[in-house]
Every structure is written in C-alpha cells, then in structure tokens.
Image (cartoon, rainbow, N blue to C red):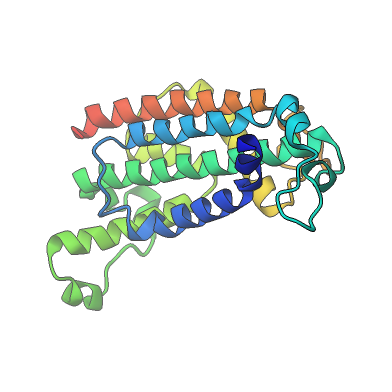
Amino acid sequence: MKAFAFATLLQVRVVIESICIVSLFITNCINAVMNDIHQNLIVRLNYLIGLLDVSSQESFEKIKDHKAIEGFDSVGEIYDNQYLIYRNQITISAVLLGYAYFEAFLTDLITLCLKKNPKILLPQGKEANKDKTITYQQLILASSYEKLIDELIEKEIRNIMYKSMPEILDYLSKKLGLEWDVSLNPEIIIANKIRNCCMHNNCIADKNLAKDSRFTEGSEIELSSGIVHFFGLLVRQFSNQLWVSAKERYTI
C-alpha cells in the first residue's frame, strides 16, 4: 500500500516541485539562504533513491492489482500490465526532478560567485560590443547599489540558464574560472539532452540525442534505475568539484 501511494502520487509531486523550482529560479535565488547549496542538492538527490526503489518489478507485482480510486483501472491496467512502461514512468520522472535540483544548484552557484565578484558582469572581448548597459530608469529606481547589482545578476542568470549545456559549462570555466574534471562533460551534456527530450519531445530521442549510440532517433527513451543512479552519481561528483572550486576561488 505504501509503495502504491508513493507511485501514484509521483506525477503530482514531480509537477508541483518542478514548477516551484523553476518559478523560484530567478525571483528567490538572490535572497535564498545559501549556507551550503551543495549539501542541499545532495539531500534532494538522496530523496530520489527511495523513489527509484519502487521502480523494481517486485514493487510492480505487489501493487498491479490495486485500484487507488474506485471506478478507475488498477495499477497494472493503467500501464497495460507492462512492467517496462511502469518502470519508465518512475525513472523518467526521477530524471526530470533530479535535473531540476541540479539546475537550481547551478543557478545558486553562479549567483553566489557573481555576488562575491560583481565585476565579472563587465563585458569583455566580443561581449564588449553587446548591450550590457543599465538604463536611467534602473539606476534611478534602484533603492541601493546592492539592489542594482542584484538586478544585474538576475538578468545575467536568466540569460545564462537558457543557453545550451556546452555554453553553460563554458561560462562556468571561462567566465567564473571554476575547475573540475572535464572528462565528466560529455555525460553531463547527455543528461541535459535526455531531460530536454523528455520535457519537449514526449520522451522520444531526437537527432541530437541519437548521436549517442545508446539512443535511437525516433525511439522512446527507456531508462533503468541503474542508468538513473549513474547520472545521479555523476551529478554528485561534478557538483562537488564545482562547489569546492567556487569556495576556494570566491571564499564562499
């Protein structure tokens, strides 16, 4: 019964938490309490271990005949009595939620670095030709210098987090000067592509993702709990290295 309740409430939880995370990316990241954003990420990722545990066939067999709501199909009937459909629903949901946590961590990390050294916001090289000025209105309406800096950081975050993952990695390295094992980059980029296909392409692998031999263009993305755990461990390693580098460089 407990396993069933967890599984059937999965969709609601994913939708609610994902919406909350995305909506708070810009408005709350400046004022958030960031004593240890990396530890917060790890705690959230660890929560997903229990979620993935109910994706096993054993769990499916135990709950497949149960009806959560009178008049509705049983769990097994909902998934056409196919375990792989059931499993994929949970694993993909875990990927989407885990990626949202990771994206929130990156947002908070960049924010902390920029607040420690706002001069990073000054355009350099090719960026110098781009419009990165503030308006008279922004200058006059800002209640303080700190408030104005916060607004500029908010704008920078918005611009960066809508870029591709390779561009974000490039920003972390060249603009913020953070260091990590770059051999992790290809799998981080793959995780991003999986997330994008699940969010925007109905969980179907597109041409971009299919460049990786593990996926076929036009085929539904299938993820085992083992694959999701692999990406979870990858994110833990990558985020830890970023966090250590940021603390050393910016005295966070």
Report the number of numbered marks: 0
If the image is split into quadrants, where does the N terminus sit? top right
Q: Quadrant of residue 129?
A: bottom left
Tell which of 156 and 62 is nearer to you.
62
The image shows residue 101, relative to residue 137, as above or below, that is above
Q: Where does residue 79 sit, x and y in percent of width and height? A: 81, 43
- Regarding residue 232, the answer to whether it shows in the image is yes
Q: Is residue 185 left or right of residue 226?
A: left
Instruction: Tell me the residue at 77%/27% (across/down).
Output: 213
- Regarding residue 93, the answer to whether it shows in the image is no
Instruction: Tell me the residue at 73%/46% (across/down).
Output: 203
Q: Where does residue 44 sit, x and y in percent of width and height? A: 44, 36
If the image is split into quadrants, where does the C terminus sit? top left
In this view, the residue farthest toward the left is 144
Instruction: Tell me the residue at 41%/30% (across/down).
Output: 239
In this view, the residue farthest toward the front is 70
Tell which of 38 and 121 is nearer to you.
38
Q: Where does residue 168 sit, x and y in percent of width and height? A: 46, 42
Instruction: Tell me the residue at 47%/29% (across/down).
Output: 46
Q: Quadrant of residue 58?
A: top right
Q: Quadrant of residue 214?
A: top right
Q: Where does residue 230 sit, x and y in percent of width and height? A: 59, 23
The image shows residue 40, relative to residue 125, as above or below, that is above
The image shows residue 169, relative to residue 134, as above or below, that is above
